[in-house]
Amino acid sequence: KEVINLTTSGRECLRPRKISVSEHSCQALPTPIINLGFPKMGSSSAHAFFGCGGLTSMHYRCNYAKACAECIRESIEAGEPPFSRCDKADAYTQIDANTKPDYSFPQIEYLENIVLGVKKATFLLPFRNMDNWYKSVREWHMMKMRLARSNITGLPQGKGKTLKELSDWFCWHVERVRDIVKRNPRHVLVEYDIEDPSTGDFMGELFGIGSNCWGQANTNTQLHPELNGTSISIPWVVKNRRGPRNEVLFTESNEKEINNEIKTNAPTLTPTQSLDYSDSCFRARSDTIPTSLYNKLPRPIINLGFPKMGTTSIHAFFGCGNYSSMHYQCSPTYACGECMRRSVEEDLPPFAKCDHAPAEVYAQIDYYDTKNILHYLPQTELLEEIVHGYPNATFLLTFRSMDKWYDSVKNWYNMKQRMQMSNITGFPRCKGKNLREFSDWFCSHVRRVRELVAKNPSHSLVEIDIEDPGAGDRLSDIFGVDARCWGHANINSKIHPDLEKSNKVPWFIKGGRASGRKEQLFQFDNVIDADKNIGKFSGTSADGNDEDDDDDHGSDDDDDET
């Protein structure tokens, strides 16, 4: 018996990459989905998975009469796109075939034609333990012998008789696929290990399909007696969860469970029907500050809330009240989050490296890091450092309706996509496909802030619902600022045409004026909406980066005066 432990040899080509999915793949993955992997690497499981998820999937055959390998070859030889003579499907889960006289591998022989000939696709590259794969190939209807005699590119005739030869061939193919997809970034490459217990969850999150749809199909019971005949056999085509004779393929007993999980992952989740907002983490508490501390709270005042939750309105409120306030930037050249990160890296208090610090109020501290293409949130990444670095601070925690917040994030110049790609604490990469995942993240952040502040009673925590009509009066009572200073700033007029003249304020306000300027920003002699207590701000906006506020569809470059 040949004994080679290839899977632990350190060869990158034998392991799926943890991040193989390109940036846009956190959204709906493009179709068709084409499996470029080898036989006996879960092609039937992939077929069952996509079929169970409601996609049209084909496996081995691409119409009643021909194998996928045959119609792909005919299409390419006729100068047509590679699948033009195959039946149309969302997923092609096995395209190789045992055709006479040789075993046919379009994913090898026509790899360039497939990648260049399909406008936009998601390619699958499955992995498994090489020893297990070798055993499976050896035991599956003389497949090992057929491969060795077929003279396949990368596996010359007579090769493929040993574990090492088959493993080297697999490695060569993996590196070739990775290289060509990298050179054609319009496509997405998904790498996964079919033997990893978490693969069902991984695939479910990527494709918005219930993880219960993932399982072992077409399994050799001689090698896997523990399955006791429970593996599933799926016909060559699945459409609307039915087979070629319109037979139902998935039993009603597990279909309900699958449907429930699909609803959880679906991006079209209806919030009012599917989410429970009764948890206290979705509601601002009104009893966190005793009346004896009104107008006496310590400074600095640091907003630990999330973007698109009223940061510009908070900034304008305190600036109008003659507090020195910073929003997004803490100097003309540095965003607050940027200088905070530099400060902590040098073992300094978070705002130590911020040029204009100390300010009385920091209304928005998160920022968009254009260099690394990610959204950086000090309120999550540096929360402990902020709390311990300023033992007498007052923290703000803002709330709003989750569905409105989610709409706001979606409509603010790719903020949703950037957050999904940023691998934020509590919000791993590619999370955030739907309202539920954003709501869960918000809830976990609220709990974390509340718990940390409770452990450090020298701090004060003010919670405010920015959509509460009484928010201005409440803030006025707590901080001693005229309630008319509270209003809507930096609003997306496409979402709120009724507030088209939303107020714009510069990044740094001191004494009610923009930094280095003489003009007064706030005038109460001309209130534009007395009923709503919205004061008129007469400020000048200039270029900026990712400042935000209540609702929007504006640019990340907004509201920042440099």
Image: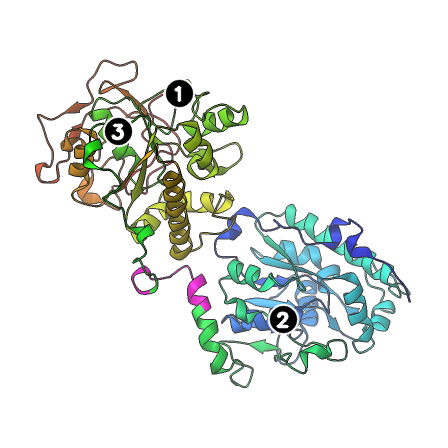
Please state the extent of the stretch shown in magenta in the rendering.
Answer: 261-273
Q: Picture coordinates of residue 435 (x, y %)?
A: 38, 55
Q: Residue 45 carries which label?
A: 2
Query: Looking at the rendering, in which quadrant would you find the C terminus?
Result: top left
Compare residues 252 and 197 and report the one nearer the observer: 197
Tell me if 86 is positioned left or right of 269 in this view.
right
Regarding mark 3 in the picture, which secondary structure is present there? loop
Q: Distance between the residues labelled 2 and 1?
A: 55 Å
Q: Which residue is drawn at 62% across and 50% down?
A: 20
Q: Which amino acid does label 1 sit on?
A: Ser
Q: Earlier in the sequence, mark 3 or mark 1?
A: 3
Q: Picture coordinates of residue 547 (x, y %)?
A: 35, 33
Q: Name the residue under label 3.
A: 297
Does the residue at mark 3 contact the one at mark 2 (Cβ under 8 Å)?
A: no
Question: Callout 1: few (<14), some (14-19), or many (20+) C-alpha neighbours within 10 Å?
Answer: some
Q: Name the residue under label 1.
A: 331
Compare residues 541 and 75 and report the one nearer the observer: 541
Asked which quadrant contains residue 345, the reply is top right
Q: Which of marks 3 and 2 is nearer the N terminus?
A: 2
Regarding residue 23, the answer to whether it shows in the image is yes
Tell me if 127 is positioned left or right of 337 in this view.
right
Q: Residue 539 carries which label?
A: none
Asked which quadrant contains residue 351, the reply is top left
Q: What residue type is labelled 3?
A: Leu
Tell me if 339 is positioned left or right of 398 in this view.
right
